[in-house]
Amino acid sequence: MRLVMKKILMLTAFALAGLAAAQDTTTPPADTSTTETTDTSTTTDTSTTTDTSTTTDTSTTTDTATTTDAGTGMDNMNMADPSTMSAGDNFTRAQEYAVQADVAYPVPFYDRTLWKAAVNSAYYAANMESGNRDYQAYLAQLYTKTQWWINAYNAWTRLGDLNDTEKQYASLAAAKLAYLALQRGDKATASMYVDKGMAWADSSSLQAIKSRL
């Protein structure tokens, strides 16, 4: 009987051992190698096309042909050649040109077309009739007005006796020449012009120049 019990116990032990072997309690290791495929190759299109080719028309047309000479050429004014005209006609033309020049230019200078035409016509008139005092005086007046000082001075000197208005013109020419002489350091010439100018008509300009001699 004991032998039978012993065999039963042994069989039971073997059965339990087999059962234990059949139960695999080992948990498989967790797969920590998580594959996270993150596509970081985000394509950002930075090729923004900015059209900077703005067309600015800078070709501004500026008419620089400013007409300071009244825009009148000899041909446009139908100016006749003074050498082909009589003294009387030249004298008349000179006066006409002078009137137009007074209107056309703010400051009279010989190099202005109308003033040049006036002076040239007066010059021909004076030379064609050298004994005509009116022609000589008018030429001297135009020389003075157009600031051709040396010609004005010489023309007034040649006339000899002057009226009060003519003396003022002559004195002005002398004062201008005296000032120019003083500017270049020629006091002797400046003094001569001052004396001559004062003989015609005294002025504050002549007095100021004299005080510097």
Image: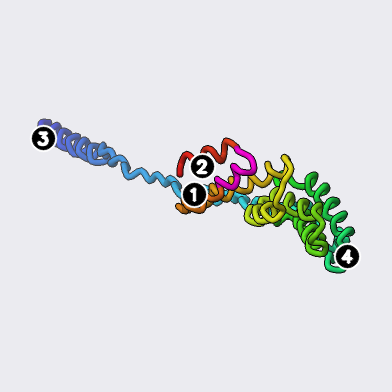
Of the image marks 2 and 4, the number of the one nearer the N terminus: 4
Of the image marks 1 and 4, the number of the one nearer the N terminus: 4
Disc 2, disc 1: CB below 8 Å? yes
Distance from the alpha carbon under mark 1 to that under mark 3: 164 Å
Distance from the alpha carbon under mark 4 to that under mark 3: 178 Å
Taking the image as drawn, is residue 122 in sight? yes
The residue pinned by badge 1 equals 182
Percent x, y of residue 123: 77, 60
Q: Which mark is residue 209?
A: 2
Q: Which mark is residue 85?
A: 4
Looking at the rendered structure, the kind of residue marked 2 is Ile
Of the image marks 1 and 3, the number of the one nearer the N terminus: 3
Disc 3, disc 2: CB below 8 Å? no
Percent x, y of residue 22: 27, 40
Of the image marks 3 and 2, the number of the one nearer the N terminus: 3
Taking the image as drawn, is residue 61 in sight? no
Q: Which one is closest to the eye, mark 4 or mark 3?
A: 4
Q: Which residue occupies the extreme left position in the image?
A: 2
Distance from the alpha carbon under mark 3 to that under mark 2: 167 Å
Q: Which one is closest to the eye, mark 2 or mark 4?
A: 2
Distance from the alpha carbon under mark 1 to that under mark 4: 42 Å
Looking at the rendered structure, the kind of residue marked 3 is Leu
Of the image marks 4 and 3, the number of the one nearer the N terminus: 3
Distance from the alpha carbon under mark 2 to that under mark 4: 43 Å
- Is-magenta flag for residue 197? yes
Q: Which mark is residue 3?
A: 3
Range of the magenta residues? Answer: 194-202
Distance from the alpha carbon under mark 2 to that under mark 1: 8 Å
Circle 1: is it few (<14), some (14-19), or many (20+) Cα within 10 Å? some
